[in-house]
Image: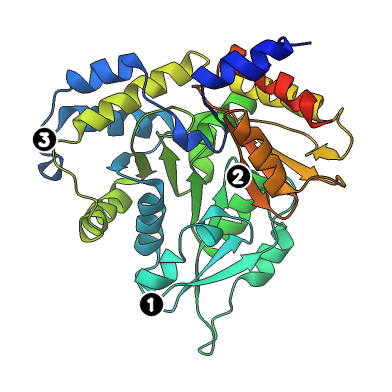
Amino acid sequence: MYFTDYFINNVYKMVHKIDLRSDTVTKPSQEMYNAMFSAEIGDDVYEEDKSVLQLQTTLAEYFGKESALFFPTGTMCNLCSLLCWNDRRGSEIIVGDQSHIFLFEQGGASQFGGIAMHTLPNKEDGTMDIAKIEKAIRDDDIHEPSTSLICIENTHNACGGKVLKESFFQELQILSKKHNIPIHLDGARIWNALQETTISPLEIGSYVDSMSVCLSKGLGAPVGSVLIGSNDFIKKAKRMRKALGGGMRQSGVLANAGLIGFRDFQNGLLKSDHLYTKLIAREIAKIPGFIPQENVETNILFVVIDHPSHNEKTVVDFFKTHNILISGWDTNLIRIVLHRNITKEDVEYLLGTIQMLK
């Protein structure tokens, strides 16, 4: 028993909201606020903001790349990369059918770049079949679009926070070089992947040609993503960022928060998120009619509801009455996401509340 029924029903839920809808809901730490207040700033469009320059240099070096560029959002960061790799309208990119770029970024590549998306099925582990990727690469035929980019995601959100295996990176890179097609990595949750994988950040950087990394999910900064690649690529991206409206001025107040989040990650920030997610999955598995995903690896947990009295809406509403927010992902499917603002006490309260679903 985690908490008394009295505590669950009367005290904790009156004074505290537990938000498990996404790791995008994190609030900055006090150290981040302090760093934002003391940031050494300038005009970043003129490359005069020292805090932004430090962030960009730090992350480029961390992943073994030449250069990096700060963006306000991950969606803009990915879009900029796709536009830079596809400078001819009518080209085509290969993406997973469960990828964030395909499902949740408004088809921006098509809206703004005239880029077609060739989707392939994502496997349960977030990868795509290498043979199917090669088969999807277009021949030099004037009737067809030309394949210009392969996009992957790590960790993979819609596949349950799965960490891509090194063998997949290796096989994909061989294919990429064979056909001279670059690879872009959507690394919105790359920090969660690095917490669990044996692949070093330098190795991950070596397997891809460009990558976006998010500062406002696992790291908990209020705003920002960073695009990382070669000097030539980032020079092109800087021009594209300006056209997309992403050229910010005294943005060091935001970059400094990202630097604090990066330091916290290096000090083991995400370990507890992953441990708590696995604990929650084990407890939910004990409740008839609730089936958590197999092989929980990071901070994302999907739960299938096969219960005569519940569906995704009733479960979301039930938790909401107890001041716990979760996401209804699909019919009879919910998602729970842990992050840096969730405490041990929050998890204990959640586990106690879960028992009331029986």
Q: Which residue is mark 3?
A: 48
Disc 3 to disc 2, C-alpha distance: 35 Å
Is disc 1 placed on a helix, strand or loop? Answer: loop
Q: Looking at the picture, which amino acid does disc 3 mark?
A: Glu
**Horizontally, is 299 left or right of 30 in the view?**
right
Is disc 3 placed on a helix, strand or loop? Answer: loop
**Horizontally, is 146 left or right of 251 in the view?**
right
**Horizontally, is 351 left or right of 206 in the view?**
right
Q: Quadrant of residue 212?
A: top left
Query: x and y percent of residue 29 in the render?
Result: 37, 18
Q: Quadrant of the C terminus?
A: top right
Q: Is residue 120 above or below residue 163?
A: below
Instruction: Indicate which disc residue 89 carries.
Output: 1
Q: Quadrant of residue 343?
A: top right
Q: Which residue is mark 2?
A: 157
Q: Is residue 113 above or below residue 305?
A: below
Query: x and y percent of residue 126 in the render?
Result: 67, 48
Disc 1 to disc 2, C-alpha distance: 29 Å
Is disc 2 placed on a helix, strand or loop? Answer: loop
First in residue order: circle 3 vs circle 2: 3
Residue at the spot 29% in from the left edge and 54% down from the top edge: 237
Query: x and y percent of residue 85 in the render?
Result: 39, 62
